């Protein structure tokens, strides 16, 4: 029992003030960068953004195609009333007015368009010329294509493949996309 009052008194001692904590030094305040997988990707250059916006804003209908020697590529004009049409979203290009459904991943830059090999639903075509059209599009419009936009009415997209074939597409407004500025 005698020990009990001593313990009670020990619990009632005045509190000791904490020692002063020194302010952190600049070395202690430095922040290590987050790991690479946590860092944001580098923003696309302004030219690439402009290209994506221009590509996705229109349906692009083939109006001219010539080989490196300047000869018209007739195999791409099987149905003049339904020209080959390219439609773009942020990552895919699809081909319209061909025999089969065709699409490929793409990556635009300010002056080029990288198109991966096309995926093609291989349904037999009643018209052999339409079947050849699919092959011509898949072979000629893939890889790194030089790209430029011409300011005209309608706007024009010109693509040039590594073999020197030149493809001209007229842009038709896409009603799904709001006009610039609104």
Image (tube, helix red, strand yellow):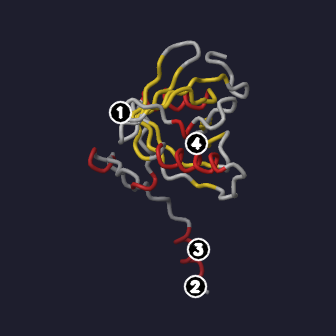
Q: Position of residue 131 (x, y in %)?
A: 62, 51
Mark 1: few/some/many CA within 10 Å (<14, 14-19, 20+): few
**14 left or right of 59?**
left
Q: Earlier in the sequence, mark 3 or mark 2?
A: 2
Mark 3: few/some/many CA within 10 Å (<14, 14-19, 20+): few
The residue that mark 2 highlights is 2
- Residue 58 shows which numbered tag? none
What kind of element bears circle 4? strand
C-alpha gap between disc 1 and disc 2: 114 Å
Q: Earlier in the sequence, mark 4 or mark 2?
A: 2
C-alpha gap between disc 4 and disc 2: 91 Å
- Quarter in which the C terminus is drawn: top right
| Residue sitting nearer the eye, 103 or 131 | 131
The residue that mark 4 highlights is 93
Which mark lies nearer to you, 4 or 1? 1
Q: Residue furthest bottom?
A: 1
Q: Residue at x 59, y 77 (%)?
A: 5
The residue that mark 1 highlights is 69
| Residue sitting nearer the eye, 30 or 84 | 84
Residue 16, picture quadrant: bottom left
Mark 4: few/some/many CA within 10 Å (<14, 14-19, 20+): many
C-alpha gap between disc 3 and disc 2: 11 Å
Q: Is residue 70 above or below residue 1?
A: above
Contact (Cβ within 8 Å) of mark 4 with mark 2? no
Q: Earlier in the sequence, mark 1 or mark 2?
A: 2
Q: Position of residue 171 (x, y in %)?
A: 59, 24
C-alpha gap between disc 1 and disc 3: 105 Å
- Residue 8 shows which numbered tag? 3
Which mark lies nearer to you, 3 or 2? 3
| Residue sitting nearer the eye, 66 or 148 | 66
């Amino acid at each position: 029992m005698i020990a009990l009052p001593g313990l009670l008194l020990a619990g009632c001692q005045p509190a000791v003030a904490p020692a002063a904590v020194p302010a952190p030094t600049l070395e202690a305040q430095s922040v290590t960068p987050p790991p690479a997988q946590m860092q944001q990707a580098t923003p696309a250059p302004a030219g690439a953004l402009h290209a994506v916006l221009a590509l996705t804003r229109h349906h692009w209908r083939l109006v001219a195609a010539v080989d490196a020697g300047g000869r018209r590529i007739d195999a791409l004009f099987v149905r003049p009333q339904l020209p080959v049409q390219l439609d773009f979203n942020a990552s895919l290009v699809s081909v319209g007015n061909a025999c089969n459904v065709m699409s490929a991943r793409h990556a635009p830059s300010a002056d080029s368009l990288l198109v991966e090999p096309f995926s093609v639903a291989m349904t037999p075509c009643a018209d052999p010329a339409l079947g050849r059209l699919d092959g011509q599009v898949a072979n000629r419009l893939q890889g790194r294509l030089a790209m430029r936009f011409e300011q005209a009415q309608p706007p024009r997209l010109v693509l040039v493949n590594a073999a020197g074939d030149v493809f001209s597409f007229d842009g038709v407004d896409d009603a799904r996309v709001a006009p610039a500025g609104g």
